[in-house]
Image (cartoon, rainbow, N blue to C red):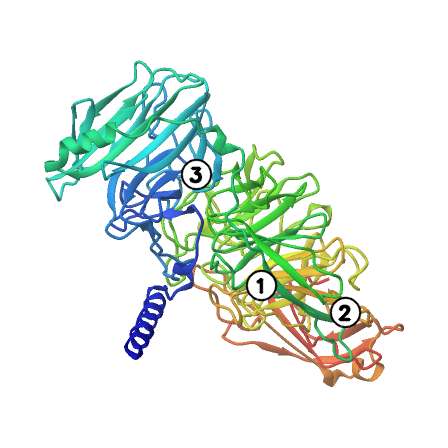
Amino acid sequence: MLHTRIAVTALLALSTSAIFAAKKNTKYEDMDYGRFLTASWDNTEGKNALKGGGCCANKGIAIKLGNDEGGILFDTDLCRWAGGWTGGFVTYKGVVFDGAHGPNPSPAKGASVHFQTNPTPTWSKGGAFADPRKLPTGTGAATVPFGPLPHDWAQYRGLYVHGDHVVISYTVGTASLLEMPALEKVNDQPVLTRTTNVLTAGAASSGMVFESEGASAVEKDGAVVVTDDRKNAESRVAIAGIGLPQGAKFSVNGSKVILQLPAFAAGQNFKIAYARGTAADEAKLIAAAKGATKPQDLTPFTKGGPAHSKEPVKTALKAGTPGEHDAYVVDTVELPFTNPSSSWIRPGGFDFFKDGRVAMSTWSGDVWIMSPANKDFTSEVTWRRYASGLFHALGLRIVNDVVHVLGRDQITRLHDLNGDGEADFYECFNNDVQVTPGFHEFTFDLQTDSKGNFYFAKGGPVNPGGRGWGPLSDHNGCMFKISPDGKKFEIFATGLRAPNGISVGPGDVVTTGDNEGTWVPMCYVHIVKPGDFVTVADLSHRANPPTEAGKHICYMPKDVDNSGGGQAWVTGEKWGLPAGGMLHLSYGTCGLYGVLQENADGITQGGVFRFPVKFESGTMRARFNAIDGQLWICGLKGWQTSAAKDGCLQRVRYTGKKIFFPSSLNVRANGIEIGFTNPLDAKTGSDTANYAVQHWNYKWTSNYGSATYKPTDDSRGKDTLTVKSAKLSADRRKVFLEIEGVRKVDQMEIKMNVNGEDGTPVPGRILNTIHVVK
């Protein structure tokens, strides 16, 4: 009996050890991304679409086959099946996964590639495959085209998820197609298949089903046999068609295998099958490819399928405790960091449904839905994963209670077709944006104006290390405007570097921030007008590069904002401050700032002051909740920041106490007038010893950021100005600081050590920019 116990104990210990040994030790590898994953993809040799051919894509959806047994890659720009493989799903590389600056994910290490095609059109138009897309122009432009094909050639419409099945919807000319990949076994031989259903008629077209440099192919026994690997003369792939339309046939053109199809007709269902092995098994491979199951009707998979996320996650609400003078306090929603899918929760965007529920997107590609929070933040909330597999989901907007998510590749509109709380149809709302494989080429935020137009911003392909750019597209560094129906896409402004957040405010005023780097001396806040050039000369997309930066509301030094977030505008009457005021978030310093604006001869100038509140992560997105009237903020930790946690969702709540904040800033030739929300203490407010002012300039160059320079002689450093007097207005809501030497400067710093009339400390620092001195 003793021996039995020892044996059982040893077995249990071994089993437990094996379980923990098998568990991966990285958040990005532990995560279940769902049945597909969208990204820019490198091929099996580590080359991206700029450098090589084959199984790579700038915008690609990798679809999981079997139980991580293989994958197939669909290029949404070209409606191209870029490649398919067995031997595992994918290798997770890149900034969102392991933090690497340069590589992208790729097929699993050592994958057996059954087919691949090059990143050019794989559906013909008028009998030709020539790429109709224009090459980008200007200094530093890439030598390959980007973006989707013209819509009358081919257009990606979206994908359906139904259990373990993923169905792609797209058009070729006027023909509407559904296609579903699968991994089958025929006599123990893995066979990779692609089923096509034709829903509407269209003109004849040919499809590239295999293309690889150095490959050769022959037709044999009703199939095509390809010698596919120039490094291995014994490698073979058999390709067969099942249920092909009458008149369809394969043709071989050097290293290309083409399926020539007659006119598309509604109701056509056919399949292409691939089997890979060695020359010795050639007959077996042909039989396996030809023996794949008959093509099936895919429309049942477009009706909504079983949910993957069956267990909601409960988390706590934590109400903040205000201090004696705190007009604002931060309440915290505990995020579902521990969850059934091991999702890495790093929020990139959020919005509210009409009933108070929250939809939140994450950098790793999820969308989660949270139940409404109670007013006092004293209960729990429940979370459920609504969608997954998106491409860096750093923006989200709810329109008519439908979730729209911004990824690097497109705006995706999510539909729950069967009401089970999980998205079944990932509709391509608009994918006109061009994407290069550059690691730093993020798209940021998603906002709408009063007419329903959408806006988002896109960065430049910053090189590893932060200086300069990789090969450029015509869309790098731009802000975009998309019509309410998603059909019209236009460049709204140019000259942005890494604009991690925008806003659309009262009167449809559009704003952006940016991050220090090439042509960006320091972070700034900027009002964007149609056709604007903002600041980055290399990304101006103009024949003659600008010779000066646009005029920002203000710059902010590094200790104030070393990596900007988005902006927001005060709404309603429940938050203490007047509606219409602008707010700015700092991702880098995890801060919230009020933005003071002055219209000086048609130019907006101003400054910022910091709210005396703290956040758990890098603040990026902010929205006011129409139900409670309070400001909600989300953010993440993904690059340089002072953030303590991977992510946060927090509420900035007005406590009802008097607010003593700066409310206005006006520049005069002999000084600065500062307005306040409530009266200042007469003694501290009128004492010149409680004020200190410095100013300095930056240099706008292609260097990374800028040092500080004295306005007096342009030497390194800062000039100190003398505050000659501090005069309070009769109502003590304004103070005029008499200052000698006020001039146009990139940066002014006003330090204050003053109190409100009840002793409440006033935020003690304003950072502003002066364009006009009256």
Near-viewer residue (351 or 291):
291
Q: Quadrant of the N terminus?
A: bottom left
Q: Which residue is mark 3?
A: 166
Which residue appears farthest toward the front when viewing the image? 1
Characterize the local packing of mark 3: few (<14), some (14-19) or many (20 or more) Cα atoms within 10 angstroms.
Answer: many
Amino acid type at circle 1 is Leu
Residue drawn at x 35%, y 37% is: 182
Residue drawn at x 70%, y 75% is: 740
Q: CA distance from mark 2 to mark 1?
A: 43 Å
- Mark number for residue 335? 1
Tell me: residue 578, above or below residue 477: below
Near-viewer residue (188 or 11):
11
Q: CA distance from mark 2 to mark 3?
A: 62 Å
Amino acid type at circle 2 is Glu
Amino acid type at circle 3 is Val
Question: Is 696 positioned to the left or the right of 5 in the image?
Answer: right
Q: Secondary structure at mark 1?
A: loop
Tell me: residue 468, above or below residue 142: below
Tell me: residue 83, above or below residue 256: below
Q: CA distance from mark 1 to mark 3?
A: 29 Å
Q: Secondary structure at mark 3?
A: strand
Mark 2 and mark 3 residues within 8 Å of each other at the beta carbon: no
Question: Is 300 positioned to the left or the right of 53 in the image?
Answer: right
Percent of width and height locating residue 276: 21, 38
Percent of width and height locating residue 488: 56, 33
- Mark number for residue 673? 2
Where, by quadrant of the figure, is residue 212 drawn?
top left
Characterize the local packing of mark 2: few (<14), some (14-19) or many (20 or more) Cα atoms within 10 angstroms.
Answer: some
Choose mark 2 or mark 1, whichever is in front: 1
Percent of width and height locating residue 355: 72, 49
